[in-house]
Amino acid sequence: METTTRKVIKNRVAFLEQKVPGYVSVLGITGILLLWELVCRLNIVPPLFLPAPTAIVTDGWELISSGELLKNLIASLYRIFGGYAIGAIFGITVGLILGFSKWADAIFTPIVYSIYPIPKIALLPLIILWFGIGEMPKIAIIALGVFFPVLINTFSGVKNVDPSLIKAAVTFGASHVSVIRKVILPGALPTIFAGLKLAAGTALLLLVSAEMIAAEYGIGAMVLHYGNLMITTKLMAGVLILSLLGLTFNRGLQWLERKLIPWK
């Protein structure tokens, strides 16, 4: 009976620890693309509503060769990197302050949680009124959307650091700055990166929304333009670029996380 139980436990552990080969993801994506192409080839769905992947690639190459895609992509990258960097820096800084200082926590945390649920894109007209028409409103709305999830995750990460580690550091004479830099920040990094990854999706969503509302150039503006013209192949090419942009963002954050948190 005991031997059987050990075998069951061993099998369960092996199942939990098994590694999936990298090619499985490639095969999955390839299968979906082939099925998509087949559905379009058999005309199960009209091309206007769902263009074939080959048609999307053909029109996407036309966008690349004409320089239109590059122009729109540069505009979008400028906005999303600028807004994301500003929002992340301020979010981490304020989160550390709120998590470390009980006074700051008591005063500002209720304000943060009352503002956080407001849809940030709804503030775009007000931000345009403040900053005028140009790049600044789009960068500001992205920064605002990034700021709150990063702040909240940083705050939660600081609060979850083992108090005994902080007390030990203080007991050995560490200053407030040293405690934050050598104890709190390393302990909170996994949660901070969770917030950064969450904020990356929010930044992409706000980028597209802002470009569709108030931009002449950008991937979001390009998608809206071809949607109005009912050229769905080029519309889907823009959506594909947005998907690749989000994937690249996520992979970049994962690489940075492995470098900064090797012990995770």
Image (cartoon, rainbow, N blue to C red):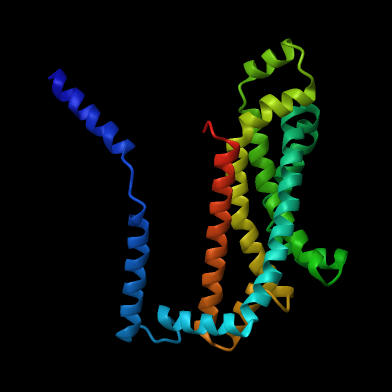
Across and down, in percent, residue 173 comes to 77, 13
Query: How many callouts does the rendering have?
Result: 0
Is 193 left, or right, of 213 in this rendering?
left
- Residue 199 in sight here: yes
Please name the residue shown 20% across and 23% down the image.
6
**Closer to the camera, 105 or 38?**
38
Determine which quarter of the picture holds residue 201: bottom right
Across and down, in percent, residue 58 comes to 47, 84
Please name the residue shown 55% across and 47% down the image.
255
Is 238 left, or right, of 81 in this rendering?
left
Please name the residue shown 66% across and 41% down the image.
152
Is 220 left, or right, of 1 in this rendering?
right
Q: Is residue 182 above or below residue 234?
A: above
Please name the residue shown 53% across and 65% down the image.
243
Q: Quadrant of the N terminus?
A: top left
- Residue 121 in sight here: no
**Closer to the camera, 182 or 109?**
182
Is 61 left, or right, of 142 in this rendering?
left
Q: Is residue 54 above or below residue 155?
A: below
**Closer to the camera, 75 or 100?**
75
Across and down, in percent, residue 140 comes to 77, 59
Q: Is residue 169 above or below residue 4?
A: above
The residue at the far bottom in this view is: 229
Determine which quarter of the picture holds residue 113: top right
Across and down, in percent, residue 193 comes to 60, 42
